[in-house]
Amino acid sequence: MRETIPFHPASGPDAGPEMPPSVPTGTVMELWRAPLLEAAEARFDDWMAMLHARYDECLESLTDEHMAFEATFISTEADGSRWMYHLQVRGAGSRGLDLTKGIDAAHEAWARSTKHRGWEVLEPRLFLCPPQVRDALCAAAGADLLPTGALPDSSHRGQPPSGE
């Protein structure tokens, strides 16, 4: 019998790591992971199907969230457990989901019923993309509104996405 991979969710508002110097000022690059609840793989697929079905609503919410990019992955780990991974680039001042909006509330509800509460933080080491992509990400994140060096170091940390 294989040992279960332990889950150590981050805690506190400064739980995220410092950003490497290649991450544009005013943005945060994050990769988080969490195990799915027992026998929740089909529920995870239903959650992603809901997001695909409501894709236009999801796109509309990105601006208010200062979210430039999001991607979600699933992985079968060595112990056979299923973990979801969430990659995002956002503005440092993002407040995340707005639970007064239908799509955000639905997204949060699916997260709570599908994955373990909290997220483990993976530490970023490099941000690399062509300048035109970097500029587009910064603009989408609202980072183009922030002068270089305007944020204190503590503001350039990752924050767990919603879906406790």
Image (spheres, grey):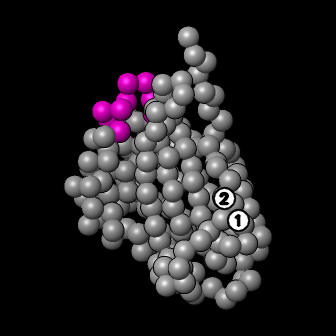
User: Which residue is denoted by mark 1 in the rendering?
Assistant: 19
Badge 2: residue crowd in 10 Å (few <14, some 14–19, many ≥20):
some
Q: Do tag 1 and tag 2 residues touch (Cβ < 8 Å)?
A: yes
Does 4 sit left or right of 151 as displayed?
left
**Region in magenta:** 36-44
- Residue 52 is situated, as x and y percent measured from the top left of the image, at 26, 55
User: Which residue is denoted by mark 2 in the rendering?
Assistant: 124
Identify the element where label 2 is drawn: loop
Badge 1: residue crowd in 10 Å (few <14, some 14–19, many ≥20):
many
Residue 26 against residue 123 in the figure, above or below: below
* Figure quadrant of residue 118: top right
- Residue 32 is situated, as x and y percent measured from the top left of the image, at 57, 49
State the residue at coordinates (42%, 74%).
63
- Residue 53 is situated, as x and y percent measured from the top left of the image, at 22, 55
State the residue at coordinates (46%, 67%).
69
Q: Residue furthest left?
A: 53
Residue 93 in sight in this render: no
Q: Quadrant of the N terminus?
A: top right
Q: Between 80 and 144, which is closer to the camera in this rendering?
A: 80
